[in-house]
Image: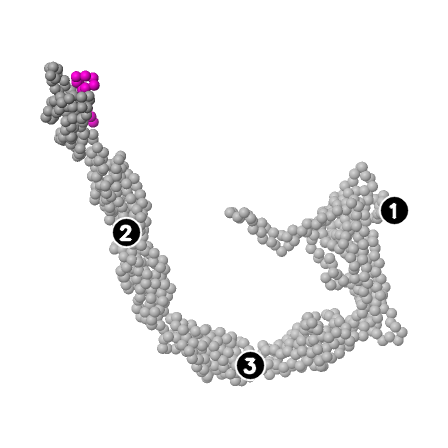
């Protein structure tokens, strides 16, 4: 801070003045050390004027500039809030006697500085519990060095420091309630004021909480009586592990305390037996919970009795089988593999035994089938593991029976390629069995492709059966294979095969009349017996049948057991497609001859509704004027929206919902229709009768679709058109019980 005196001199251009400046060169907490500098400033030309100063010797002034600069001179210590007053002066007397002078004075007080706060000391961390630590420290704040606040930082498990709290300047402790078990905590504190932090942190020691328990204990036998214990140990604060052992999993005894952080493996030598282990981590007086108990470990001991696998008890082994395979499973108590085995077998119920030695680890052995026919063989096994002693023999031996396989020969048909000329077909066989009796027999007849056409199983000892036409009529002039399988009470079986062909004399070919009724969309059928040629010896026709062959190849019986000239009607055949009708002639023993006729029933554009089950659906309502229909099929399903997914899930059921709608016009009365354009079935009255019927309806569409359905109708009549009525029909497909659709 500078001060300047007034200018003085002979002229306005030639003059001088006294100047001074003061500053604080150093300071402490109570005072500052003040220095002063004094000098003269001059302008113009003095030409050697000698000037007196209050701080220096005489000074000769010449031209303008600075003279008698004292430099910084010590004043001394000045307390904060106290000012020192200093002065400076300069003068001279001219030759004319004029006195020229300049002086200056000023007061200066050192400014109070902002001091860095003193660091805290004696930072102490006290563990109160696993969930609380208390940190305390000594404050060292002074008046010139106050605390505006205090930072508290925390370090967990020796990791990075993080700010835990910001406290007021007067705080001397802080409680941390966010600690947890299995962790170590250290703290540091740092005071601050408005301008600075402290020069250093104050650090606490580290406190350690209760260690975590081992999460899993795994044990394994290392040697005969040595156990390796392996732990999943997540402890972070443990300094030791306490190991306990139990023979029964309930009574425990401490067997080792092992130093380490953390301990993950150790060994124990408990001697022979079955053992369980558990452990806990410790740190001084702190101890974790006990781990879950390990699985049992068995030190070396003989195995248990083996599991017998095959032959199973009660099985029958054919004498023709060259060898019997015995199979078992070694059951080790101590985990050691099988080192040897012995098989024992007996044919006298265990009174005497034959022993077969099985070396090494084989658990299967083949024994020649030298056992007597019909003998009951008892067998057992014992095994050996790492222990020197054998385990026990199997406590429940298995038994099996050795039996002779029966023999069977087809006697009818008597030989391969035999010719069958009549029905019923008789099948017979001979049977021989040393070990039992015939339990049942199964006969299957197959065609040349191997497809099974007929089968029957008979129980007991019967050795023949007849295949009648009521069961199957084998095609004429064809080759077949007969497969016979006979099962014995001994549980064994025998088979035989015979080939044969058919060559029947058939009845005369019947005649079939088929007439299409276009009004009701039906086919009228009449069947007649065939006429025998003069002198013919073909079998006499006893009855007649009428059938329709469906698109899938199945036959729909329209008449059966009919006499000559019998007529019937196919009341709801598919429309606009070729239909095949078959007339069948039957002899007394079931032989047949057939006649096929093809016809087609034109829809003429009509949709037919057949109804009235009592008339075999002979009643009809139909529409063709302006007729339209549509069909909708929907698979049963459930759609489920799931949270977070844009698209839903869908689950499909086993059923399909089929619905149709038909609309069109019909005549109000058949008398209103132009000649040839209508009939009684295409009137509003016909649809009225349809609605009144309580049964299932059959809906037939042009070009073949036939649907059993529940039908609802709405008939509308307009005064603007007295000739026709409009019909809307809603159709729901239903199950076709007893209907050939």
Q: Residue at x 35, y 69 (%)?
A: 221
Q: List x then y, in percent, for residue 168.
A: 27, 37
Q: Nearer the viewer, residue 671 or 199?
A: 199
Residue range corresponding to the magenta coloring: 1-15
Q: Residue at x 15, y 22 (%)?
A: 47
Residue 107 visible in rendering: no
Circle 3: element type: loop
Circle 2: element type: strand
Q: Earlier in the sequence, mark 1 or mark 2?
A: 2
Q: Nearer the viewer, residue 252 or 720?
A: 720
Q: Earlier in the sequence, mark 3 or mark 2?
A: 2
Image quadrant assignment for residue 389: bottom left
By secondary structure, the bulk of the magenta-drawn segment is best described as: loop
| Pointers 3 and 2 in contact (C-beta within 8 Å) | no
Left or right of residue 530: residue 480: left
Q: Residue at x 62, y 52 (%)?
A: 636
- Location of mark 3 (residue): 321
Residue 675's tag is 1
């Amino acid at each position: 801070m500078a001060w300047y005196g007034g200018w003085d001199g002979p002229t306005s251009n030639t003059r001088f003045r006294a100047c001074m400046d003061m500053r604080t060169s150093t300071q402490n907490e109570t005072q500052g050390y003040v220095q002063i500098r004094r000098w003269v400033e001059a302008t113009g030309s003095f030409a050697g004027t000698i000037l007196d100063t209050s701080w220096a010797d005489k000074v000769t002034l010449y031209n303008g500039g600075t003279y008698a600069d004292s430099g910084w001179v010590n004043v001394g210590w000045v307390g904060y809030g106290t000012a020192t007053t200093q002065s400076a002066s300069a003068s001279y007397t001219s030759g004319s006697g004029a006195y020229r002078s300049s002086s200056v004075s000023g007061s200066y007080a050192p400014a109070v500085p902002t001091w860095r706060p003193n660091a805290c000391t004696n930072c102490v961390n006290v563990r109160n519990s696993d969930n609380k630590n208390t940190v305390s420290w000594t404050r060292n704040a002074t008046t010139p060095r106050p605390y505006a606040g205090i930072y508290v930082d925390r370090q967990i498990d020796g990791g990075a420091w993080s700010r835990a709290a910001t406290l007021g300047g007067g705080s001397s402790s802080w409680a941390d309630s966010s600690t947890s078990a299995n962790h170590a905590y250290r703290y540091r504190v740092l005071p601050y004021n408005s301008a600075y932090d402290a020069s250093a942190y104050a650090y606490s020691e580290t406190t350690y909480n209760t260690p975590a328990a081992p999460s899993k204990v795994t044990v394994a036998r290392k040697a005969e009586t040595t156990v390796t214990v392996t732990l999943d140990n997540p402890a972070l604060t443990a300094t030791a592990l306490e190991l306990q052992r139990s023979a029964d999993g309930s009574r425990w005894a401490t067997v080792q305390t092992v130093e380490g952080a953390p301990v993950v493996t150790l060994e124990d030598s408990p001697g022979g037996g079955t053992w369980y282990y558990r452990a806990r981590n410790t740190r001084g007086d702190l101890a974790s919970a006990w781990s879950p108990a390990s699985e049992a470990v068995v030190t070396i001991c003989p195995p248990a009795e083996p599991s017998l696998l095959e032959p199973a008890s009660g099985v029958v082994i054919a004498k023709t089988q060259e060898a019997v395979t015995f199979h078992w499973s070694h059951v080790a108590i101590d985990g050691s593999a099988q080192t040897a085995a012995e098989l024992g077998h007996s044919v006298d119920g265990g009174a005497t035994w034959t022993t077969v030695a099985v070396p090494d680890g084989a658990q299967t052995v083949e024994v020649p089938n030298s056992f007597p026919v019909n003998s009951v063989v008892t067998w057992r096994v014992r095994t050996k593991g790492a222990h020197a002693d054998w385990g026990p023999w199997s406590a429940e031996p298995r038994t099996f029976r050795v039996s002779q396989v029966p023999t069977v020969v087809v006697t009818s048909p008597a030989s391969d390629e035999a010719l069958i000329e009549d029905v019923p077909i008789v099948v017979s066989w001979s049977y021989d069995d040393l070990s039992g009796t015939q339990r049942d027999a199964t006969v299957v007849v197959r065609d040349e492709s191997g497809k099974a056409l007929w089968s029957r199983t008979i129980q007991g000892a019967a050795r023949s059966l007849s295949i009648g036409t009521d069961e199957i009529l084998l095609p004429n002039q064809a080759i077949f294979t007969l497969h016979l399988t006979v099962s014995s009470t001994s549980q064994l079986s025998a088979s035989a095969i015979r080939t044969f062909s058919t060559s029947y004399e058939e009845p005369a070919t019947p005649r079939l009349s088929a007439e299409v009724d276009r009004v009701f969309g039906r086919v009228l059928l009449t069947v007649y017996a065939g006429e025998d040629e003069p002198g013919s010896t073909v079998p006499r026709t006893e009855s007649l049948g009428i059938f329709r062959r469906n698109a899938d190849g199945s036959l729909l019986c329209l008449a059966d057991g009919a006499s000559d000239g019998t007529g019937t009607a196919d009341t709801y055949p598919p429309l606009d497609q070729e239909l095949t009708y078959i007339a069948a002639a039957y002899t007394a023993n079931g032989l047949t001859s057939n006649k096929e006729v093809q016809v087609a029933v034109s829809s003429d554009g009509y949709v037919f509704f057949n109804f009235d089950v009592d008339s075999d659906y002979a009643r009809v309502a139909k529409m063709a004027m302006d007729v339209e229909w549509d069909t909708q099929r929907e698979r049963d399903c459930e759609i489920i929206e799931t949270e977070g997914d844009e698209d839903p899930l869908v689950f499909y059921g086993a059923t399909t919902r089929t619905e149709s709608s038909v609309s069109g016009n019909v005549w109000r009365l058949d008398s209103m229709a132009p000649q040839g354009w209508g009939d009684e079935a295409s009137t509003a009255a016909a649809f009225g009768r349809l609605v009144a019927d309580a049964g299932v309806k059959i809906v037939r569409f042009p070009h073949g679709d036939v649907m059993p359905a529940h039908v609802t109708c709405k008939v509308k009549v307009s005064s603007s058109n007295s000739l026709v009525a409009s019909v809307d029909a809603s159709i729901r497909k239903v199950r076709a019980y007893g209907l050939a659709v």
